[in-house]
Amino acid sequence: MLEADFKYIIDTFFALFSMVLIIFMVPGFAMLEAGLVRTKNVSSVLTINVMIYAVASLAFLLIGYTIAFGSWENSNMSIWAAFLFQMAFVGKTINIMSGGVSERVRIIPLAIFAIIMGAFIYPAVVNISWGADMLAGTFLDINMHDLAGSTVIHSTGGWALLAAIFIIGPRKGRYVHGGIRVIPASNIPLVVLGAFLLWIGWFGFNGGSVGSISSVENANIVAKTIMNTNTAGLAGAIIAGIIMYVRYKLFDITMILNGALGGLVAITAGPDLFNMYVPILVGAIGGALVVFAVPVFDKFKLDDPVGALSVHLVNGIWGTLAVGIFVEKVSFLEQLKGVIIVAVFAFSVSFIVIYIINKFAKFRATDDEQQEGMDVNECGVEAYPEFKRAI
């Protein structure tokens, strides 16, 4: 067998294996969100997660991939493997949004937005960052280092979520008489399961983004990338737990897990460039940002049941800027420029699209429908029919 053929086969297998790990994040998001919402909304959340994966992936197959990369040509691996790896990312961008608007969002308008995100919005962001680069040679050309998408994926989803929250508003009863009504998670074991499925998926998310494992050099980069990814998650979990205990003398497992996820989002931009110690700092800051950002968003009545804004938007920004801070050969200003351009595009376009869809297909369920639960009104199937539904 020729060496070139061997490398082609190994890299094709690597892309397919990484894709499978990333797809584990589909049930990861589903379980995390199902555990964090009330029992009367669980079937709706699960249905949304399935529909997002289906419609966004198909839209990316038919339209989005070509917009993102210009063509299907790839000399390093099978074009089908290259597509599947990139397709695995698409649903994650919308998953970030779906969790943040759960318990009051209707399925059909969100599915319509998922199609547009998968076909046009996300591919456009990929085009100007990783892909065909239609802005090359212009002032808006992005030259940031974002290995696996702290900005391209996580911040893009976060900005879309922020636009959606502005239009849809908070859940009924979340903010009462100037105060914040605490709505507890319904199933903590599911939250833990979902978070760890996401954590495992992140190894394919970041490790696979190196693009090749068929040489000694690339194999070492992949291994370092996965190690740094895990390290940041560990640091995020630990610092979130410490802060919660210092402030409240309690260990909140949901906040600890979101701290881990915040660290994982933060490291996603540069795990291939950092040494083995920097991810501890990047992840720890990421975990701390989650703890402090959650009450800030609540203060402005930006209702986010799963903490997606704090985990994905805030840490997507932090992680991208961290590369410019800790890696000498990467320009901080270029990182900042990339963050700003993606922010303006993703937020403004998402806001316009959601606003238009909302005119003929309302995203927000009525107060009575929210009271009864989205499972009954949107799915006709309750996840826990033997339980009395919480109000």
Image (spheres, rainbow, N blue to C red):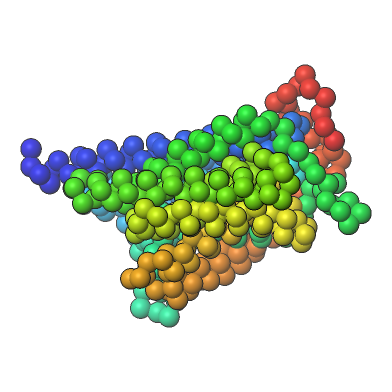
Residue placed farthest to the bottom in the image? 139
Tell me residue 106's x, y (percent).
Answer: 71, 43
Measuring from the top left, give residue 142's x and y in whole percent. 41, 71
- Which residue is outermost to the right? 177
* Residue at the image position 39 percent from the left and 36 percent from the top: 20
User: Which quarter of the figure has residue 36?
Assistant: top right
Give residue 76's position: percent from left, percent from top.
22, 50
Image position of 222 (left or right of 98): left
Q: Residue at x 64, y 50 (%)?
A: 243
Q: Quarter-wise, where is residue 162 in the image?
A: bottom right
Quadrant where the image shows the N terminus: top left
Front-lying residue, 177 or 372: 177
In the rendered image, residue 74, in percent from the top left (x then y), is placed at 25, 52
| Label total for image | 0
Residue 346 visible in the displayed image: yes
Q: Is residue 30 visible?
A: no
**Where is 311 relative to 20, above or below?**
below
Q: Residue furthest top?
A: 386
Q: Is residue 88 left or right of residue 301?
A: left
The quadrant the C terminus occupies is: top right
| Residue drawn 70% across the image and 26% down it | 383
Residue projecting furthest to the left: 2
**Nearer to the camera, 51 or 209:** 209
Q: What residue sits 59% from the left and 34% below the top?
A: 192
Residue closest to the eye, 258 or 119: 258
